[in-house]
Image (tube, grey):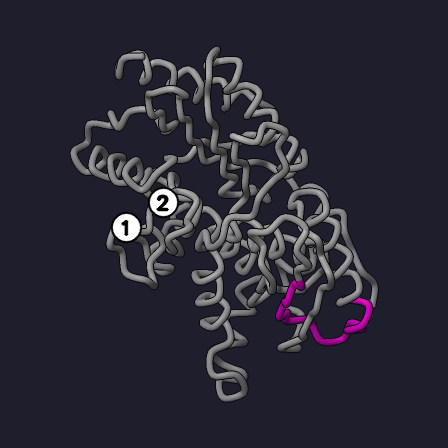
């Protein structure tokens, strides 16, 4: 975590690839176990919670996605799922602090960049089969009103019109950001990074 | 305000925050708080103290980190939390609120009803 972490846990000496002392593999095991028994050190960490949300999302696309990645096209994109997981770990960190408006000048309200990236990732839930990989807030988010561009990489299912999917994803992201983050969004750029077969199972019910 | 009074106020604010619509979690407000909880868990005591950080003085400084659901705009919930803390402190206070997590789970009902035809 960085110095401007919301919870100030940057000085705890955890490894940079960890989230408050937990690896993504540990978080995956925690999900496998149904989050039981409860691990307070995971549940008390916003970064872990953001990462768990994203891992759950990945898993809802179904086991076929994982099989596909490891068996069908290992050379095409080295290890796509691993890259997504690494991106989740990176994006779940608190990052910069984005101000929220407040009438009292002595008070300081804000939302972490990690929480906003988690919000952007959740927009993928509304578009069937779409999975958001890396997302970046480009611009000085710490200055109220500064123009910010959102850069998102997405994976989309084969057989659905990419233009419609990305339009819908852009709308979902924009709606969520307008509702929850008081940012001046100058644009939302979506790069389709991957087209894959729509997995049977979890993806169909979304 | 004594340390004991501050701890009591912090516990009361934490309880009130958790009852506030839109607030789903109160997280340790500092790295020290996170570390204190980790140590308490390791020792099995479960007595890490309140997650709301209060620094006594004039003004009182209160620092909280929140997890919110997405049923209500994050800014609105944060400002409601700020008002709640002002009422609880009942004196000069400087408040720092950080939204550290937006819980997506409440949206899952609407996700299930969303479809797109090829």
Instruction: Point out the image quarter for the C terminus of chain B.
Output: bottom right
- Whether callout 1 and callout 2 share a subunit is answered yes
Mark 2 surroundings within 10 Å by alpha-carbon count, few (fewer than 14), some (14 through 19), many (20 or more): some
- Between B89 and A123, which is closer to the camera in this rendering? B89
Image location (x, y in percent) of residue A49: 45, 46
- Left or right of residue A150, residue B67 in this image: left
Which residue is depicted at the point 35% across and 60% down? A25
Does B64 sit above or below residue A13?
Answer: above
Q: Is residue B2 magenta?
A: no
Circle 2: element type: loop
Which residue is depicted at the point 56% across and 55% down? A117
Between the residue at mark 1 and the residue at mark 2, the CA separation in whole angstroms equals: 7 Å
Does A68 sit above or below residue A185?
Answer: below
Q: Are marks 1 and 2 in contact (CB under 8 Å)?
A: yes
Image location (x, y in percent) of residue A146: 66, 55
Does B3 sit above or below residue A180?
Answer: above
Which residue is depicted at the point 44% across and 19% down? B13
What stretch of residues is rendered in magenta?
A: A149-165
Disc number placed over residue A8 in the picture, else none: 2
Which residue position holds label 1? A11
Counting every numbered tag in the picture gives 2
């Amino acid at each position: 975590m960085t110095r401007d972490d919301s919870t100030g846990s940057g000085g705890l000496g955890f490894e940079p690839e960890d989230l408050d002392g937990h690896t993504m593999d540990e978080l995956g095991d925690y999900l496998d176990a149904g989050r039981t028994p409860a691990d307070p050190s995971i549940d008390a960490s916003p970064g872990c919670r953001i990462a768990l949300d994203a891992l759950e999302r990945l898993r809802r696309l179904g086991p076929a996605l994982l099989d596909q990645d490891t068996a069908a096209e290992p050379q095409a994109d080295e290890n796509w799922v691993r890259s997504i997981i690494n991106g989740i770990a990176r994006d779940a960190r608190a990052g910069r602090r984005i101000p929220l408006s407040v009438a009292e000048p002595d008070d300081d309200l804000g939302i972490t960049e990690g929480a906003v990236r988690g919000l952007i990732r959740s927009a993928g839930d509304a578009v069937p089969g779409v999975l958001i990989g890396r997302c970046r807030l480009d611009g000085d988010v710490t200055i109220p009103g500064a123009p910010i561009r959102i850069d998102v990489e997405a994976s989309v299912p084969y057989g659905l019109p990419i233009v419609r999917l990305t339009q819908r994803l852009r709308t979902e992201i924009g709606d969520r950001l307008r509702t929850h983050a008081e940012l001046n969004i100058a644009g939302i750029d979506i790069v389709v990074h991957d087209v894959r077969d729509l997995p049977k199972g979890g993806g169909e019910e979304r | 305000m004594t340390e004991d009074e501050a701890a009591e106020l912090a516990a009361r604010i934490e309880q009130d925050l958790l009852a506030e619509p839109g607030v789903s979690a109160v997280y340790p407000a500092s790295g020290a708080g996170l570390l204190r909880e980790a140590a308490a868990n390791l020792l099995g005591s479960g007595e890490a103290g309140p997650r709301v950080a209060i620094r006594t003085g004039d003004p009182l400084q209160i620092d909280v980190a929140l997890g919110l659901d997405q049923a209500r705009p994050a800014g609105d919930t944060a400002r409601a939390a700020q008002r709640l803390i002002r009422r609880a402190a009942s004196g000069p206070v400087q408040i720092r609120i950080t939204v550290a997590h937006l819980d997506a789970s409440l949206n899952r009902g609407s996700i299930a009803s969303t479809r797109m035809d090829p």
